[in-house]
Image (cartoon, helix red, strand yellow):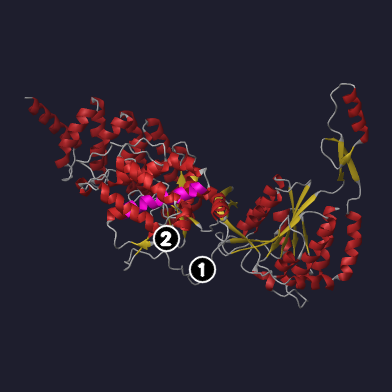
Amino acid sequence: METATITAELEACWKQLDCGFPRVEPVFADCMREALATLSRQGVDAYLEHARFLGKMGRGAEPILIFLEEWPAVAKTLGEEALPAIMDFIRKMWKSPNGNSITPFLQSLPVTARRLQSPQQLRGYLDIALDFMERTTGSIHGIHQTFPSPGLPEFFKQIPLLLGQLSLAGLKSWVEYGVRYYQDHPDRQIDYFSLQSADSRAVLQRERHGTLLVDNERKLDMYLRGLWHDEQPLIPYSTAFDILRQPVPYYDKLGIRLPDVYDDAREVAGIDRYRAVLAHIAGHRRWTTAIFADNFSPFQRMAAEFLEDSRVEYLAMREYPGLRRIFAALHPIPAENACDPEQESGVRHRLAMLSRAILDPQHSYKNPQIVEFAQRFHMLMQQGDSSTREIAELAVAFIVQTRRQSDQLAKIHFKDTVVDYRDDNRQMWKFIEEGDEEEAFDAPRKIEPGEEIKGLPPRHYPEWDYLNQSYRPDWVSVYEALHPPGNAADIDRLLAKHGALAKRLKKMLDLLKPQDKVRIRYQEEGSELDLDVALRSLIDYKSGAMPDPRINMSHKTSGRNIAVMLLLDLSESLNEKAAGCDQTILELSQEAVSLLAWAIEKLGDPFAIAGFHSNTRHDVRYLHIKGYSERWDDSVKGRLAAMEASYSTRMGAAMRHAAHYLEQQQADKKLMLILTDGEPSDIDSKDGRLLIEDARQAVKELDRQGIYAYCINLDRKADEYVADIFGKQYTIIDKVEQLPERLPQLFISLTK
């Protein structure tokens, strides 16, 4: 009787659904039984009503099938009250050209529900998606034809991964970036929202929590260079996009591969997790020697890798004892009886216990073989540094003595056996006959034609987008390096050539030199004794009162406290001949800068010189010619003599990077002089105003930092743009041949 009632109810529901798709009928009964067990009576009616709509809207059988199968589970997570908002969003897609996005939206709904967990969160998510859809539908290049959003289906396909990495606020920022910059570019929009483009991944990482490699690359690079004397590039790999393989750190001939982000774990900060990985890999690079793998079984290779990892960590901790705290906190502690030998293979479990016992002398393991081999390891290390070959022999002995029949079982015990700061040990092995997947690590790396190895990791700077009145984050990569040396005698000849001008300048400089000295009294430490205060303190001491200890005084020069940054445009156009002159603009610039540097050195002002050029936003070169701590000597003159011009002029990024050094100077006035012969431009910027507006924004940023930016422009047509960038803070030198005389005079007038 009860079965007949259920059958009758199912038939009534099927009639209410009124669906003509043959694919739906075979699964309907099972879906309906789950719905009747999960939903309220009103919920069942709404379920059938909305399913009927999905079947009638002309998008095939997929939407109704997905909805029938998935909604009961989604309702259990979010509640039945979430359905009206979902269906309202689906109707908006249906009425727009975006009907092709309905199926991926419904497919992503179960995972979305599990991530969001509440109707309120769901409404926030739907608001983001709706705004995305409205802004990218029918908006390409101003065409008024209606067509679907190119990126919306890809967005729904990626939403499970996105919500696994981002909060709703982070998701909104990520979507906003993609819509803002790619709504007029269908192909780029698809690449962005399918997580294929570099910008997409970069913005995703920016919005993620944790310690990002991109934010700490320079710090970690200095750590590697300073402590381990290793200069390998740090190359990130994504932990978000390779879910199945779960890659681990490793190194190859191109550099050290690290996760793009580390969260804090086991009371260890993300930055310290990076340091642990680098210390471990640097230990391998210093102490591990590749051995032939062909004569080792898989278990023996695994054991050799575990013990070699322990060996390099032992040596690293001996050199830097502070690493022990980080290693001990990150290394798992396998429970001794966690592995069931009747059901699981326990090789990894035993090796992880041995690794922990070697690291922690206070371990609690009772297994006699674990205790014995931990002691044998330490005895071997105390006899000397040992070698990879000796450690491999110890590993083979451990496998032989601890072997069990259950080790051959397919099910392997993995719990608390993964040491996530260790690399994959590919550097340990070489092969008598290499296959396609193997690589000889002892073979020298071949540099591909045209490949250039850069020095320090780049600094990333934003760039101003005047069309959207916002910054493009981390848009420009600035690589800095010390300028190659040249012949200092060339600069001495240039200075001798302008000897008469130098004499005139010297008279002007003598007037600018600070003459007055001011006495600073009441100093506990100073250059000389302040007799008045000292006598008063002595009288106080003799009379039993507390004497004033500030009995010294010092002096400071009054009237001048200026730090200068001279930033030189080294773009290709400097190689052109100056009008009415046999010299190139670059040669005249060398003369002018030489005289200016000589003049500033005479005044005693701290100053630095740097040049820049660019080859797209990915490669802006910043070349140090003189640092603030350097004297005006032959090494600096040699770099100045070797100056060469090439590529383009991405001025805003260079100014921001120069400001990074200038703002650290202790001075009352900070002056940045920019010497250029043309407007900002680069080959990847088709909008001529874009880099001009970015340079203008950079000048505003410098002003907020207390830096006075002044441009000396050698372009006769500079009136068309230079005022837009620098306001009134510029001088145009029409006759370039006058530059050696005008540049020092301009500096003197700016700083007097």
Q: Is residue 45 above or below residue 708?
A: above
Distance in Å between CA atoms under marks 2 and 1: 28 Å
Instruction: Determine if the magenta segment contains residue 682.
Output: no
Mark 1 neighbour density, 10 Å: few (under 14) some (14–19) many (20 or more)? few
Based on the picture, tell me whether residue 307 belongs to the magenta stretch.
Answer: yes
Question: Which residue is found at the position 15% from the left and 36% from the top?
Answer: 29
Residue 356, given in percent of the width and then of the height, sits at 38, 42
Q: Is residue 454 left or right of residue 21?
A: right
Question: How many numbered circles does the render carry?
Answer: 2
Q: Is residue 683 left or right of residue 305?
A: right
Give the amino acid type for the residue marked by disc 2 in the picture.
Answer: Thr
* The residue positioned farthest toward the left in the image shown: 1
Dot 1 amino acid type? Glu
Given residues 633 and 194, the one toward you in this image is 633
Q: Quadrant of the N terminus?
A: top left
The answer to whether 529 is drawn above or below residue 562 in the figure is above
Place of residue 417 in the rendered image (x, y in percent of width and height, measured from the top left): 34, 43
Q: Which residue is mark 1?
A: 451
Q: Secondary structure at mark 1?
A: loop
| Residue 183 visible from this viewpoint | no
Q: Position of residue 154 (x, y in %)?
A: 37, 50
Question: Which quadrant of the figure has residue 225?
Answer: bottom right
Q: Which residue is mark 2?
A: 289
Closer to the camera in the image, 2 or 343: 343
| Residue 509, numbered circle | none
Give the mark nearer the N terminus: 2 vs 1. 2
Per the image, label 2 sits on a secondary structure element best described as loop
User: What secondary structure prevails in the magenta region?
Assistant: helix
- The span shown in magenta is 301-318
Q: In front here: 504 or 22?
A: 504
Q: Residue furthest bottom?
A: 582
